[in-house]
Amino acid sequence: MGALTGFTTVARALWNTVFFGTLDIPDMVRSGELDHFLVRPANPLMLILFSKVDTDVWIEIAVGTGMLAVALHVSGAELSGPVLVFIPLALAGSALVFAAMHLAVTALSFWLRQDAMLSMLIWRLDTFAQLPMSFYPTWLMTVFSTVVPFAFVGYFPCLYILGRTDSPFVWLLPLAGPLLFLPAVLLWRSGIDRYSSTGS
């Protein structure tokens, strides 16, 4: 539990370092502030990414790393060479999974203008990733492994880090982030096209 919490805390903090600004997309769509990004000669998503920085992110990274280190020491998990290589790869992939889910949900604001509801949903999403999948009923485990892929954020990577699985397929887990981020970007672009064509 401690390893999972520490791992997901670091992954979420890494997401915050770059993608924190995407949380403001619903407000930008509603208020029209997004227009300021669309008229500039640069990718609007990139501009939004660098428009806001979470200053507490380094504290979260330090706390999460400490929790993960203590949990690994207490569990007696063997930090072999492959595990040490896997951890940063898995963290980067998990951060992109967070980014993909948040970007996809915020992009829905181009169609659904209830940004208060979307913001509440976004902030509640992350808490599901901090609990072991065994905590949830089977049907919800299936959802978190497919439709809303929280299992890829921390649970599956931590199984390997803690030595509870030696499946070679765990090395495919870091790819979940890029594979999920691509359709989220496509959804964002579809929303931008709709926003630009309607002028609202």
Image: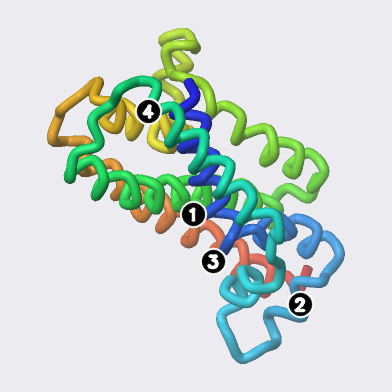
Q: Residue 148, how many percent across, how many down?
A: 48, 33
Q: Residue at x 47, y 50 (%)?
A: 95
Residue identifier under label 2: 35
Colour style of the rendered protein structure: rainbow
> On the rendered structure, is 30 left or right of 137?
right
- Mark 4–mark 1 distance (CA, rounded to whole Å): 37 Å
x then y, percent, for residue 1 = 48, 20
Residue type at the position of mark 4: His
Quarter of the image for residue 35 reads bottom right
**What's the CA distance linking mark 1 and mark 2?**
21 Å
For this orientation, the residue located farthest to the bottom is: 41
Count of numbered marks: 4
Marks 3 and 4 in Cβ contact (< 8 Å): no
Check disc 1 and report the residue beneath it.
Answer: 184
**SS class of the residue under badge 1?**
helix
Q: Is residue 134 above or below residue 80?
A: above
The residue singled out by tag 3 in the image is 189
Of pointers 3 and 2, the one earlier in the residue sequence: 2
CA distance separating discs 3 and 2: 14 Å
First reached walking from the N terminus: tag 3 or tag 4:
4
Disc nearest the viewer among 4 and 2: 4
Q: Is residue 4 left or right of residue 43?
A: left
Q: Which residue is mark 4?
A: 73
